Image: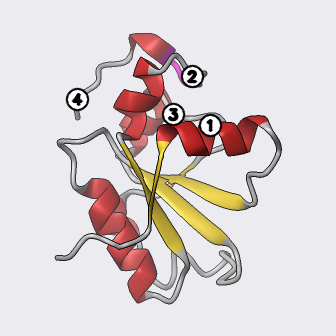
Amino acid sequence: MHKLSVETDVADVHYDIKHGVNNFLLIDVRSAKAYEECHIPGAINLPSHEINEETTASFSKDQLIVVYCWGPACNGGTKGAARLSGLGFKVKEMLGGIEYWRKEGNDVEGTLGHQAPLIG
């Protein structure tokens, strides 16, 4: 599996959300449990192994999708981005995942919030 040549980072995603230029769909590709415990505000959950034509039928192919997973040691974001790209979507992988998002002090939502573990 090859990484996408189009990536983004936590700082850029945070800036875009904060300044209202988030014209993208943000997808947390971790498990439903991990998402429930802690996720980026506004993100939806679609685990990477569940990405297919049926689960993405409501997504617009004209809208950019940004995916993230746990962090640098996780390849779920890469897998999710590759699957979405293979289905014809414009997609970027957010490098650093939820780990770097939290380390930079950005807001999170979920039942455990910042207390959630940083491993899957």
Marks 3/1 in contact by CB < 8 Å: the verdict is no
Between 6 and 119, the one nearer to me in the picture: 6
> Which residue is at the far right?
20
Q: Is residue 112 visible?
A: no
Amino acid type of the residue tagged 1 in the rendering = His
Residue 24 position (above or below residue 39): below
Q: Are marks 1 and 2 in contact (CB under 8 Å)?
A: yes
Task: Say which label, 3 or 2, has the lower sequence index.
Answer: 3
Within the image, what quadrant is residue 73 found in? top left
Numbered label tally? 4
Element carrying mark 4: loop
Cα–Cα span, label 2 and label 4:
18 Å
Q: Which residue is mark 3?
A: 39
Q: Is residue 45 left or right of residue 100?
A: right
Amino acid residing under circle 2: Asn
Q: CA distance from mark 3 to mark 1?
A: 13 Å
Image position, residue 57 (x, y; %): 61, 81
The magenta stretch is 108-113
Q: Amino acid at mark 4?
A: Ile
Would you name the residue on which mark 1 appears? 14
Judged from this view, the residue extending furthest toward the top is 115
Which residue bears the numbered disc 2?
A: 106
Sequence-wise first label, 4 or 3:
3
Q: Position of residue 83 (x, y in %)?
A: 36, 77
Label at residue 119: 4
Which is more N-terminal, label 4 or label 2? Answer: 2
- Residue depth check, mark 2 versus mark 4: number of the one nearer the observer: 2
Q: Residues within 10 Å of mark 2 (few under 14, many from 20)?
A: some
Q: Is residue 92 left or right of residue 18?
A: left
Q: Nearer the viewer, mark 4 or mark 1?
A: 1
Q: In the figure, 41 relative to 64: above or below?
A: above
